[in-house]
Amino acid sequence: MLQLHVTDDRGAVTTFEASVFPLTIGRSPQAGIRIAAAGVFENHAQIDLADVESQGQRFFIQPVGQGHVLVNGEVVTSKRLVLGDEISLGAARMVVSLAPARQPRLGFHEAVVWGLLLLVVTVEAVVIHFAQ
């Protein structure tokens, strides 16, 4: 999952985890990431996940409408994002990273496997006992 660490024009840092794409960024209440910093338009930018031939899936950012997007200080029309990139939208700054991987909870499945193993061992012990 893509993670963005957003610093607004007041210096407040907020972390967003993006899992649905395309992801819109802007002032709009409907934006996936809402930023109310100076110079940020209603729908300022969009991040999308695209398949790149022989390279797998990659994240791309592009401006929407009148918004300007800077990646590492350079104005872009479309740019592939890499870890550590700094995105500037108006007075807001974002740093790109990946969210930590989450381990699924497997307690129930482990209990079922151990129960089945115990059942097999018990049945084998009974068969051996009566076979003698």
Image: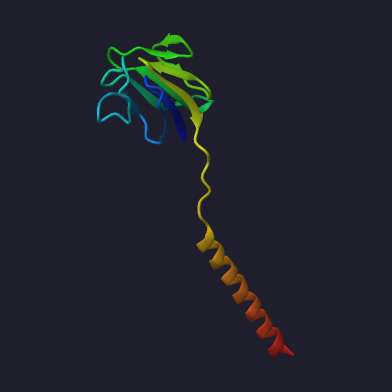
Q: Quadrant of residue 50?
A: top left
Residue under the image location 41 percent in, 11 percent down: 76
From the viewer's perspective, tell me whether residue 102 is left or right of residue 14: right
Query: Considering the image in quadrants, where does the C terminus appear?
Result: bottom right
Front-most of 129 and 92? 92
Q: Quadrant of residue 55?
A: top right
**Residue 64 vs residue 123, the one in the foreground:** 64
In the rendered structure, the answer to whether residue 82 lies left or right of residue 132 reads: left
**Residue 105, image x, y percentages:** 51, 55
Instruction: Measuring from the top left, give residue 91's x and y in whole percent.
Output: 37, 16
Residue at image x 32%, y 20%? 37
Q: Residue at x 59, y 68 (%)?
A: 114
Q: Nearer the viewer, residue 65 or 129?
A: 65
What x and y, as percent, mark residue 25?
Answer: 33, 25
Q: Residue at x 44, y 18 (%)?
A: 87
Q: Is residue 107 above or below residue 90?
A: below
Give the side of residue 82 with respect to residue 49, left or right: right
- The colour scheme used here is rainbow
Residue situated furthest front in the rendering = 10
**Extreme residue in the right direction:** 132
Relative image position of residue 62 (x, y in whole percent) = 37, 18
